[in-house]
Image (spheres, rainbow, N blue to C red):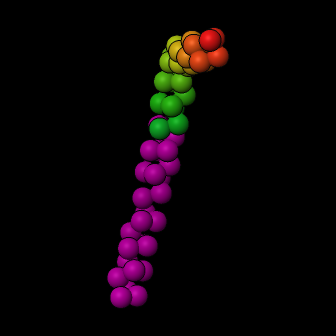
Amino acid sequence: MRRMWSRLVEDERGDVPGWVLVTLMTAGLVILIWGVAGPALSEVFQQAMERVTGF
């Protein structure tokens, strides 16, 4: 059991650059989407708040 666990851990260590790349690409996509959709989402939120508090 211990050997199997150590093999799994060693296998995962070899893919660190891949995980770093995935993390950076995900962060880039979030920033891009936030930049494009941020103003529209802000406007939707403002309209919803005005409807709730506007009675």
Vertical position of residue 43 compared to residue 19: above or below = above
Quadrant location of the N terminus in the rendered image? bottom left
Q: Picture coordinates of residue 17 (x, y %)?
A: 47, 52
Q: Could you tell me which residue is drawn at 53 percent across and 36 percent down?
A: 27
Whether residue 34 appears in this view of the structure is yes
| Main SS, magenta residues | helix
Residue 38 in the image, given as x and y percentages of width and height: 55, 19
53 to the left or right of 30: right
Residue 46, x across and y down, in percent: 61, 14
- Is residue 24 positioned above or below 42 on the image? below
Q: Is residue 39 visible?
A: no
Give whichever of 45, 11 is nearer the camera: 45
Please tell me how many numbered marks the rendered image carries. 0
The residue at the point 47 percent across, 57 percent down is 16
The span picked out in magenta is 1-25
Let me know if residue 38 is in the magenta part: no
